[in-house]
Structure formats: structure tokens, C-alpha cells
Image (cartoon, rainbow, N blue to C red):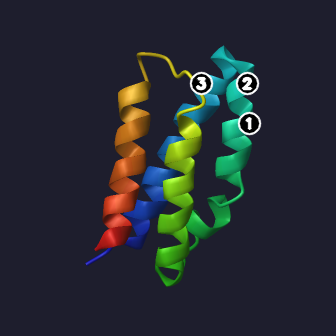
Amino acid sequence: MVNSEKIKNDYLQLLRLIEKESLIDTSISRYLNYLNKYKNKFIDQSNLQHKEELKEFLKGANRFSDEFSFSEQNISQIRSLINNLYETLNH
């Protein structure tokens, strides 16, 4: 069963990491702005109603993230969170 709270928490954690990255490299703020466009849909209690839309958004977010260089400290966790969100929504 898909956990709405897990989706919310993982997305908020992803946003926090990207915010940290944007302090290091200001060009990453473009990616942060992109992710923030869907923040409300990910953190809303009814996020499961938008599963297909959110999965499509994550595919685009994953491709868009390739345009940025994240720090070694955070890149694996960023990739992992995006993949985990996608997998969670896939169930």
C-alpha cells in the first residue's frame, strides 16, 4: 500500500537537499523552483489522487536534474530520493 505521508516526507527531504545545494551553486535554484511547482501536490494528504501526474513529473525532474552538478555529499541521496518517490508512487 502506498503511504501518503512517506511521499510527503521524502519530497520535503528532497527539497531541503536541493535548497542546500542552491546555496553552494546558485544555478541550482532553477531546479529548486521547478520542484517547488509541485510541492503542494506532493505534500497534500490527497497526493495519492495524483499518482500518475506525480510520476510523470518525477520523470521530468529526473531528466532535468542531469543539467546540474550536485555536490558529492548530496548527489546519491538526491538520486535515491527521486527514485524512491517514483517507486513509492508506482505501487
Quadrant where the image shows the N terminus: bottom left
Tell me what residue is drawn at x 50 percent, y 57 percent.
58
Circles 3, 1 touching at the beta carbon (< 8 Å)? no
Question: Crowding at label 2, few (<14), some or many (≥20) Cα neighbours within 10 Å?
Answer: few
Amino acid on which the number 2 mark rests in the picture: Ser
- What residue would you read off at disc 3? 21
Front-lying residue, 84 or 69: 69
Tell me what residue is drawn at x 33 percent, y 53 percent.
84
Circles 1, 2 touching at the beta carbon (< 8 Å)? yes
Circles 3, 2 touching at the beta carbon (< 8 Å)? no
Tell me what residue is drawn at x 43 percent, y 52 percent.
10
Amino acid on which the number 1 mark rests in the picture: Arg
- The residues bearing labels 1 and 2 have C-alpha atoms spaced at a distance of 6 Å
Horizontal side of residue 8 vs 40, given as left or right: left
Residue 15 in view, yes or no: no
Horizontal side of residue 21 vs 30, given as left or right: left
- What residue would you read off at disc 2? 27
- What residue would you read off at disc 1? 30
List x then y, in percent, for residue 3.
Answer: 34, 71
Question: Crowding at label 3, few (<14), some or many (≥20) Cα neighbours within 10 Å?
Answer: many
List x then y, in percent, for residue 56.
Answer: 52, 66
Q: Secondary structure at mark 2?
A: helix
Q: Quadrant of residue 50?
A: bottom right
Tell me which label, 3 or 2, sits earlier in the chain. Answer: 3
87 vs 82: above or below:
below
Residue 55 in view, yes or no: yes
Q: Secondary structure at mark 1?
A: helix
List x then y, in percent, for residue 74.
Answer: 43, 25
